Amino acid sequence: MATTMLKGNEVQLSGADVKVGDIAPVVTVVAKDLKDVQVGGKNEKSQIVVVVPSLDTAVCASETRKFNEEAAKVENAEVIVVSMDLPFAMGRFCTTEGIENLTVGSDFRAKAFSKSYGVLIASGPLAGVACRAVFVINADGIITYKEICPEITEEPNYEAAIAALSLAAPVAQASSCCGGGAC
């Protein structure tokens, strides 16, 4: 069973142990407007899935603001922040913080994302919420980057995650000037 730390104390994680190179499980989370959001699987864009315990903490809020600014600059990529927060709280957070470049998704209904990606905290005071993690999924639905933060109270490696997203993002096809022929 995978583990991480919470203020220096080991906590167990439960769920599937997905790895880089695996096909990303397709799961549905709930957007702030209560619509379904698909995470994982084949897509037109690459995805960076930022997992946080709750947007109602300083570290999670800071991390979400950072990914809203930095990862959203990557073309042909989608940024999704997943937590157990209720969709209404996520909407309020986005409005208050001016978060407009990413999608927030709640895993509160069945914890399907957390179980499918192995980030559900199974022990300790935060049992039942997700740990802090980042996954990059390319357009073919393959996990190309995974970081389970070793300490839940600390932010992820932004540079490595955004570099992995940049590598995973599909390059936009330039249209031909001659309708498909050589110029």
Image (cartoon, rainbow, N blue to C red):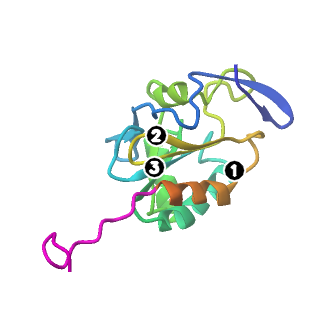
- Image vertical order of residue 36 relative to residue 50, above or below: above
Q: Residue furthest left?
A: 179
Checking the image for residue 80, the label placed there is none
Of all residues, the one furthest to the right in this rendering is: 8
81 vs 41, nearest the viewer: 41
149 to 67, vertically: above or below: above
Residue 151, horizontal then vertical, whole percent: 78, 40
Q: Position of residue 70 (x, y in %)?
A: 56, 66
The stretch of residues the image draws in magenta is 169-183
Quadrant for the C terminus, please.
bottom left
Label 2 secondary element: loop
Name which residue lies at 16% across and 72% down.
181
Among the two numbered marks 2 and 1 on one chain, the one whose residue lies closer to the N terminus: 2
Q: Write down the residue under mark 2.
A: 142
- For the residues labelled 3 and 2, the Cα–Cα distance comes to 10 Å
The amino acid at mark 2 is Ile
| Mark 3 neighbour class, 10 Å CA radius: few under 14, some 14 to 19, many 20 or more | many
- Residue type marked 1: Pro
Q: For the residue labelled by badge 3, is the local secondary structure a helix, a strand or a loop? A: strand
Q: Which residue is mark 1?
A: 156
Which one is in front in this view, the residue at disc 3 or the one at disc 1?
3
Viewer-closest of 121 and 86: 121
Residue 47, numbered circle: 3
In the depicted view, which residue is nearer to us: 11 or 157? Answer: 157
Q: Nearer the viewer, mark 2 or mark 1?
A: 2
The span from disc 2 to disc 1 (Cα, nearest Å) is 21 Å
